[in-house]
Image (spheres, rainbow, N blue to C red):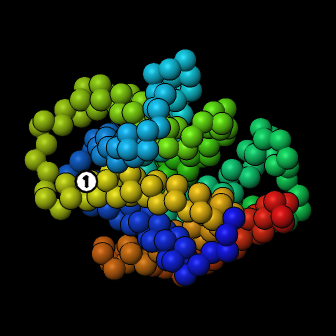
Amino acid sequence: MKQPTLFDYLTLTLLALIWASAFFNIKIATFSYGPLMIAFLRVFFGAIPLILLCYFKKIKIEAFTKDWYWFALIGLINLVLPFFLIAYGVKTVQSNLAAILMSTTPLSSTILGHFFVKNEKMNYLKTFGILIGFSGIIYLFSDNLLINQNNFISALLILLGSTCYVIGGVLTLKISKKKNENVTASILIWAVIILIPITFIIEEPWKLTPTNESTLSLIYLGVVATGLAWLLRFRILKNNGLVFQSQVAYLIPIFGIILSYIFLNELITPKVLVSLFAVVLGIYFVKKSSSKKII
């Protein structure tokens, strides 16, 4: 891989900003839309740029080939469930807390990787990073000002959403030889198929009277925070590799807190800052150990 340039770092920062901005936009979308509708329109609008990319690059989309069940399963676990759980949880939990809770994905993936992925075994440095990171999450749950008996379950559901991302990532290894664009487009298509009947039966979206603000946030979530973000991710992976792209994990919770404060004036308590520091430090130790092994 080539040495990263200033433009590469700017692209990485842009990707982190886009993914971080998803959290406060989800909060705004929940003012008018239910969690199923948010999940559905995210994958629907997100699928469009990916399908167009595959069309122009002449990449075959294998959503309905012999491996369809893998795409369907990954679409369910990696997109449908986390998108729904995050939207459901953010209704009663501050979006900046959701950004911190979701940032535990690298920590959870390290734990699952130890059991299900060859050459991804735990070592002392990884274990130390995981303990620090999840200690920060436990400390965050002790912030009674922000997490209480009214939204405790919602916070846990967001944490469960991050775990779904990890499980989906492990399942993706089953089809890792396929092109990244094909896999992403295929799982998005299946996520749309899964969500259409559930959303229209349960939430009856034709009865909604959404605000323009919520609708714009929802369109942004699909087109930019899902579709465009994945295209940026592909570019970074191709030009700079996985280790460089993984650095986005440090920036997302930081930007998430800043953007939530700017756009929603969400409360930032000392416990939030301590938890943020612990999670980012934990991710640093986990990724430092992984990068040493790769080198």
Classify the position of the N terminus by image quarter.
Answer: bottom right
For disc 1, the neighbor class at 10 Å (few under 14, some 14 to 19, many from 20) is many
Q: Count the marks: how many?
A: 1
Position above or below: 27 against 13: above
Q: Kindly tell me whether residue 52 is visible in this rendering.
A: yes
| SS for callout 1 | helix
Picture coordinates of residue 258, whole percent (x, y): 43, 78
Q: Amino acid at mark 1?
A: Ile
Classify the position of the C terminus by image quarter.
Answer: bottom right
Q: Which residue is mark 1?
A: 219
Q: Nearer the viewer, residue 241 or 248?
A: 241
Position above or below: 258 against 183: below
| Left or right of 99 on screen, residue 36 | left
Outermost residue, right side? 124
For the point 55% across and 17% down, which residue is it?
A: 66
Position above or below: 129 against 71: below
Picture coordinates of residue 135, whole percent (x, y): 70, 65
Q: Nearer the viewer, residue 24 or 78?
A: 78
Picture coordinates of residue 90, whole percent (x, y): 39, 56
Picture coordinates of residue 42, whole percent (x, y): 34, 47
For the point 36% across and 28% down, which residue is it?
A: 193
Position above or below: 42 against 247: above
State the image quarter where residue 214 is shown.
Answer: bottom left
For the point 25% across and 26% down, which residue is it?
A: 201
Q: Nearer the viewer, residue 83 or 89?
A: 83
Q: Nearer the viewer, residue 6 or 24?
A: 6
